[in-house]
Amino acid sequence: MNSYLSLIKELQSEFGQVVEYKSAKGVTNEGWFLLEITPFPNPTELEQIVSDINNVRPVGVQGGKMVRLENYNTSDHIVLQRAVREALKHLEEQTYKVAVYVGQTSMTALKNQPIAIVIEPEISYFTYPYHPHINVGGYDKANKFYFPDSLCYTDNPQLLGSTQKERLLNAFSQISMWLFRHQVWEATRKYKKRGVWIGPETGELLPQHYPRILEPNGMCWCDTNKSYKDCHSLSDHLALANEEAKRTKIPQQRIQKVILSEEFKVWEQGIRLPKRDSLRQLNIAFNLS
Ligand SMILES: [Zn+2]
């Protein structure tokens, strides 16, 4: 695997920390990287970078850190959302450890893009039940592995590039930008319920989306500190049944019965989803715990 090692060297020289994943029980050891990303920019550039992201103007990433690309008029980089302005006052540097898988998977939803999983601090539907931009994880037949929830950092993986090196460097930059937006979003939750996701896509979830992404014993999305199964799960499952009835034209009552008696029961018994064991495996594999 000499070419692989030289690729890692090249990625390290251009992006920074890129650690090869050695091996761990139950997890394939090919195609995994660990990135340590600290996206927080130079504080003097913070407002302009946020404003540039809001206005879909290009921003740069150097070794995982956000950088301003161009100078605009001062009036151009006013941040309009009050919650964001408040949040920026308290924003601090934060380092994220991200496991990136670049091999093949059978998960069509991820269209064979590099899969990025933040393992420290954990970013998943378990830790952020109403996160606007996470891909729900799942079982991958090709690797016999439950992939944890991952970052939704690109809509069009084709645009990442053609060579593997180009694709990875672009993916790493997109991941860094996602992490910065996440950091801002997290901080804005103090000032605005559900937070503000800066930039064009808001990614808001509807009640019928939650049954397929939240864990029964995890927190509910409504911020009550109740477990999901003791809070909104029943009404969300009913919303899901209504949507399925519309989509399939199967009578609503019949769908409700199926979802509440079968799907709901299976879901309720999945007290600890295997995705969380996978997260632990990745932590061990990268020597983080
Ligand atoms: Zn609730």
Image: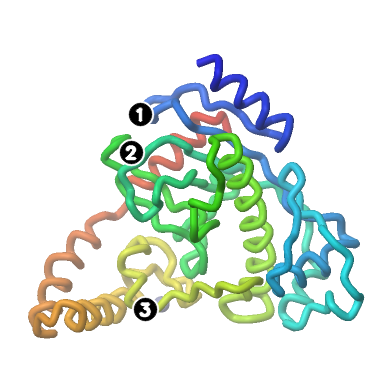
The residue beneath circle 3 is 207
Number of other residues with Cα within 10 Å of mark 1, as a class: few under 14, some 14 to 19, many 20 or more:
few
The residue beneath circle 2 is 145
- The earlier-in-sequence mark between 1 and 3 is 1
Secondary-structure class at tag 3? helix
Residue 111, compared with residue 239, is above or below; it is above
Count all numbered tags in the image, as a single digit: 3
Secondary-structure class at tag 2? strand
Task: Give amino acid for label 1.
Answer: Gly
Residue 7, compared with residue 204, is above or below; it is above
For the residues labelled 1 and 3, say whether their Cβ atoms are less than 8 Å apart.
no
Number of other residues with Cα within 10 Å of mark 2, as a class: few under 14, some 14 to 19, many 20 or more:
some
Rounded to the nearest whole Å, what is the CA distance between mark 1 and mark 3?
A: 35 Å
Q: Write the residue at 53% across / 41% down.
A: 162
Q: Write the residue at 22% across / 83% down.
A: 242
Rounded to the nearest whole Å, what is the CA distance between mark 2 and mark 3?
A: 28 Å
- The earlier-in-sequence mark between 2 and 3 is 2
Q: Write the residue at 37% across / 64% down.
A: 214
Where is residue 92 shown, x and y percent of the image? 78, 58
The residue beneath circle 1 is 26
